[in-house]
Amino acid sequence: MSRFDENFRDSIATVDKDGKRSWVFAKKVTGKYFKRREIFSYLLLIVLFVGPYIRVFGEPLLMLNVVKRKFVIFGQIFWPEDSYLFAIGMIAFVVLIIVFTVVFGRLFCGWACPQTIFMEMIFRRIEFWIDGDWNQQKKLDKMPWKGVKLRKRLFKWTIYWIISFLIANTFLAYIIGSEELLAIITSPPAEHIGGLIAIIIFTTVFFAVFTWFREQVCIAVCPYGRLQGVLLDENSVLVAYDYKRGEGRAKFKKGEDRKAAGKGDCIDCGQCVHVCPTGIDIRNGTQLECVNCTACMDACDFMMDKVGLEKGLIRYDSEKSIKTGVDFSLSGRAKAYIVVMFLIMGLLVTLLFTRTDLEATVLRVPNTTYQKIDSVTYSNLYNVTLINKTGNTLNVNMAIVGENATLETIGGEMVKLESGKQLHKEILVKMKKQDLSGPKTPIKIGVYNGEELIEQVTVNFSGPGF
Ligand code: SF4
Ligand code: SF4
C-alpha cells in the first residue's frame, strides 16, 4: 500500500480535466543547486557550440556524418567497416545509462540533458527577462492579443527563433562537419536548397519544442523518461521529499512548537510546486514527470531557512533511506550492472586500441590451390582488400615481410588509396621448393605506406607438402 492516495497518477499536471493543455508557469528559482547547475550547464553549452570547430589530430572532435557514413569521435575516424565497434559502443552506452539510472536516478535529466539545459537555462531565462516572473506571465497570458502582449510575444519569439536557428546549425555541424556548414553559409542559398530546407525544418522543430511543447518532451516523448519505471528502485538516489519528517504538513505559525503540536516540517507553502517546470507536487512521491531539476530542493531549502527549520526536507536521497533512516548503499542489482558495464567497457577499449589505421584482408582466390611454375617454384594467387581508415590518402604497396617468398601485385605496385576508400587487388606470391615447410607454409604480407610498414597479415601458402 502506498503512503498516499495514488489518484494523482491517473492524470498529468499539464492536462486539465477536459484534456486541454494546462500551461506551466514555473516560478523563478535560485539557490545552491540552481547556481551549480547554471555553471555546469553553461560549460556544457560552450562545449556544444564550440565542439564542431575543435580539431583533434586534424579531425573534428565529434562528427556523425550519416550521409557520407563517416563518424569521427575524439579525432578518430570510424567507417561502416567499424560497425562492430559501434554496436559494442552502443551496448556499453546503454549499460552505462542503466547503471547510472539505477544508482543515480534521473541525475542526467536535471544536469546534462540538452532539453533541460536549453529550456531552463536559455529559453526560460529569456522568458523571465521579457515576460517577468510566473505571476506576471499569468497576467500577460490572459491579456488580449494586442499592445503589450503582442509586442512581447513577437520580441520573445524572434529571439527564440534566432536561438533555434543557432542550435539547428550547431547540430548540422555535428552531422556534416563545420567546413561544409561554413561552405553552405557562405555560398548562395540556391546552391544548397536541400540544406536550407533542412535547416528551416530543424529550426522550426526546435522553436516549436521550446516555445510550446516544452515539458511535454520529458513527460510524453522522451524514451529515457519512459524507462524510469523499470530502472528505478527504492535504492536509487532521486530528488525526494522526506515524508517522515515533513508529514503532518501544516501552515507555519510564528513561535509555535511544531513537534509539540504534532506537526511535520512541511509548512505547506506550495513553493516546491510553484517552481516545478513539469507542474508536479514532489510531496506525492517519485513521479515519472520529475526530471530531477532540483528546483524544488532550492525552493524548499529557502523556505526552511526562512522559518528556521533544517534544510533538506526535499533532497537527493533514496526512497529506502528515507523510509529506514539508513544511509544510501549500492544494491546488489546495481553492483551486478557495474560489473557488466566494466566488462563491456574493457572489451570496447581493447578493440579501440587494437584497431589499425588500415584494414587488410588477404584470402586465396576461391577454388585455387597452388600452381607449379617450374621444377622448384610454386605460386599462390590471393585476393586482397584494403580499407583506408585514416583521414589521409595513403600510397599503398605490398611486399613479403621476410625472405621466404616474393610478391607481385597484379596491375601495378604503388596505388593511391583515398581516405575511407576500399581497394581490391590480386597478388601473386611465389615460393621456392626449399622454403616450403609442408602443405601450408605461413607467410607474412606487409602493407606499406611508402616505406612505412602500416599493417601485416599472416596467411598460409599452399604447396604440395613434400
Ligand atoms: S519535482 Fe522538483 S526536481 Fe522534479 S521536476 Fe519538479 S521541481 Fe524539478
Ligand atoms: S517547499 Fe517544502 S515546506 Fe513548502 S510545501 Fe514544499 S515541501 Fe513543504
Image (cartoon, rainbow, N blue to C red):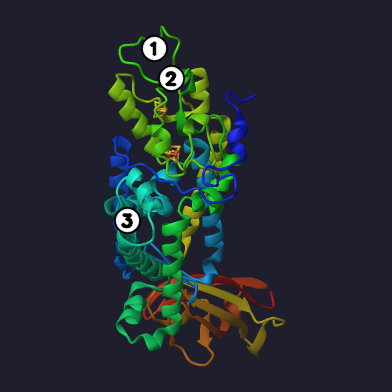
* CA gap, disc 1 and disc 3: 45 Å
Q: Where is residue 455? Give x, y as percent.
A: 46, 71
* CA gap, disc 2 and disc 3: 41 Å
Q: Nearer the viewer, residue 171 or 388?
A: 171
Is disc 1 in contact with disc 2, using a CB cutoff of under 8 Å? yes
Q: Amino acid at mark 1?
A: Arg
Label 2 sits on a secondary structure element that is: loop
Q: Is residue 150 above or below residue 199?
A: above
Crowding at dot 2, Cα within 10 Å, few <14 / some 14-19 / many 20+, comes out as some
Residue at mark 2: 250
* CA gap, disc 1 and disc 2: 9 Å
Spot the residue most to the top: 260
Residue occupying the point 38% across, 61% down? 145
Residue at mark 1: 258
Q: Nearer the viewer, residue 250 or 136?
A: 136
Residue occupying the point 28% across, 55% down? 130
Q: Amino acid at mark 2?
A: Ala
- Residue 45 shows which numbered tag? 3
